[in-house]
Image (spheres, grey):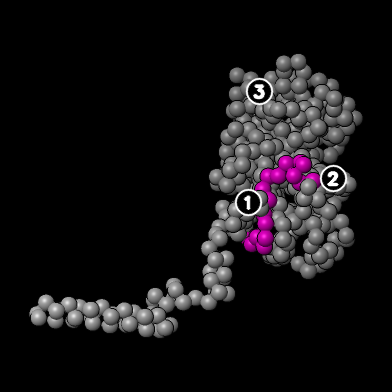
């Protein structure tokens, strides 16, 4: 009898528990109902949110975060370091070369450009980053100025156009994919080809026409190219050289407005007027002015049509400073001491005119300090 009574109570309690559990599933506030009693549309929505993170071409969370730190919020995709054929597939074409666009530089010691205030550049940068953030596809290219192992300047280009990236990839030297991300002070180039032509008026620079303009802020290590400015290669190189100067100097290199002349096994550093340069252009490593002189050797700032696999040359065997003097006071040829060379470098005398450090473009370097540094290097080379 006792055994049957216990068995009945057990069966009764089990039935009650089952009923309680069954009734509880109709209560929307219980945790179990949140997982089991889900409508079909909600279930589909939950399934969609599970697909995270997105992966594939154009999707990189690391790159997106890096761009966000530069003020760019990726709307859809960001493509990084595409090669020539990949850029072409995305619509890149070779743009017609331009020259003479307006160049604005903030923070330069030497002229060759117009001034832009801190407030004006800040307004410009805000409008440009907002514009690029509104474009579905953003294109990023990483490169380097100089590529001297310890004294180069890393550069990241952020553009709304694959054509601009294609053009700038022919200016900058190649660098490993993560080199810019790991660099302490990279330069940033913002390219807004499709921004409103009236952006110059908006920020207070006045009308810039339909071709666009170039603006750089040395303090921010930033360069902005608006409209078709990415096609003005010479203007871009001048602005990039001004931005790179402080970085190169801080790393022990000398940014010089010189050319490299190679004669047999000898490397020669040449400072001269454009007229003189044209007379020996076939022997030049690059027609562009701009080299980095360091303890590792000497390297041109930018790529050129003559560029080969290596762009780091051994230390120069000689330094030539060419001066134009129709008066005949300066000897045709003379050997200079390091001190005399530093003086002529600082003067840059050309027929009654002075071009300090032989630099025609904007420069962020204190030229007196630069001449002292060259004097020090010359003493080492001649010792």
Mark 2 vs mark 1, CA separation in Å = 27 Å
Which residue has dot 2 on it? Answer: 94
From this view, report whether residue 223 is shown above or below residue 234: below
From this view, report whether residue 46 is shown above or below residue 11: above
| Dot 2: element | loop
Work out whether residue 110 or residue 354 is closer to the camera in this orientation and state it.
Answer: 110
Q: Can you give x and y, in whole percent of width and height, for residue 175 in the image? A: 64, 38
Left/right placement of residue 185 relative to residue 86 reads left
- Residue drawn at (66%, 53%), measured in percent from left and top? 58
- Residue drawn at (87%, 45%), measured in percent from left and top? 97
From this view, report whether residue 120 is shown above or below residue 6: above
Work out whether residue 47 or residue 201 is closer to the camera in this orientation and state it.
Answer: 47
Residue 354 occupies quadrant: top right
| Dot 3: element | loop
Which residue has dot 1 on it? Answer: 56
Residue closest to the far top: 264
Chain part drawn in magenta: 71-88
Residue closest to the far front: 1
> Can residue 271 be seen in this snapshot?
no
Labels 2 & 1 near each other (Cβ < 8 A): no
- Residue drawn at (64%, 62%), measured in percent from left and top? 73
From this view, report whether residue 56 is shown above or below residue 22: above
Mark 1 vs mark 3, CA separation in Å = 43 Å
Work out whether residue 27 or residue 260 is closer to the camera in this orientation and state it.
Answer: 27
Disc nearer the start of the sequence (2/1)? 1
Front position among marks 2 and 1 = 1
Which residue has dot 3 on it? Answer: 314
Q: Can you give x and y, in whole percent of width and height, for residue 124 in the image? A: 72, 63
């Amino acid at each position: 009898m006792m055994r049957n009574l216990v068995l009945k109570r057990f069966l009764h309690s089990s039935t009650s528990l089952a009923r309680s559990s069954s009734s509880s599933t109709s209560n929307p506030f219980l945790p179990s109902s949140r997982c089991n009693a889900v409508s079909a549309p909600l279930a589909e929505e939950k399934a969609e949110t599970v697909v995270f993170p997105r992966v594939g071409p154009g999707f990189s969370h690391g790159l997106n975060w890096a761009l966000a730190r530069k003020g760019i919020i990726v709307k859809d995709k960001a493509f990084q370091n595409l090669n020539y054929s990949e850029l072409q597939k995305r619509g890149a074409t070779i743009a017609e070369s331009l020259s003479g666009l307006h160049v604005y530089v903030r923070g330069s010691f030497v002229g060759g450009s117009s001034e832009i205030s801190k407030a004006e550049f800040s307004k410009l940068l805000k409008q440009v980053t907002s514009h690029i953030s509104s474009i579905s596809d953003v294109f990023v290219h990483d490169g380097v100025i100089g590529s001297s192992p310890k004294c180069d300047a890393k550069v990241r280009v952020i553009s709304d156009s694959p054509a601009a990236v294609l053009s700038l990839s022919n200016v900058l030297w190649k660098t490993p994919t993560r080199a810019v991300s790991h660099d302490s002070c990279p330069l940033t180039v913002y390219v807004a080809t499709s921004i409103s032509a009236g952006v110059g008026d908006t920020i207070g620079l006045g009308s810039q026409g339909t071709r666009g303009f170039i603006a750089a802020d040395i303090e921010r290590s930033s360069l902005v190219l608006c409209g078709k400015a990415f096609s003005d290669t010479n203007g871009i190189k001048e602005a990039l050289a001004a931005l790179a100067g402080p970085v190169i100097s801080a790393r022990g290199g000398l940014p010089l407005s010189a050319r490299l002349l190679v004669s047999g096994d000898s490397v020669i550093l040449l400072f001269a007027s454009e007229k003189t340069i044209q007379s020996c252009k076939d022997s030049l490593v690059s027609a562009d002015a701009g080299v980095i002189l360091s303890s590792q050797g000497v390297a041109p700032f930018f790529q050129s049509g003559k560029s080969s696999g290596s762009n780091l040359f051994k230390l120069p065997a000689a330094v030539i400073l060419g001066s134009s003097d129709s008066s005949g006071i300066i000897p045709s040829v003379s050997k200079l001491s390091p001190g005399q060379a530093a003086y002529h470098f600082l003067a840059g005398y050309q027929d009654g005119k002075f071009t300090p450090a032989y630099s025609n473009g904007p420069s962020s370097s204190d030229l007196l300090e630069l001449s002292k540094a060259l004097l020090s290097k010359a003493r080492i080379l001649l010792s």
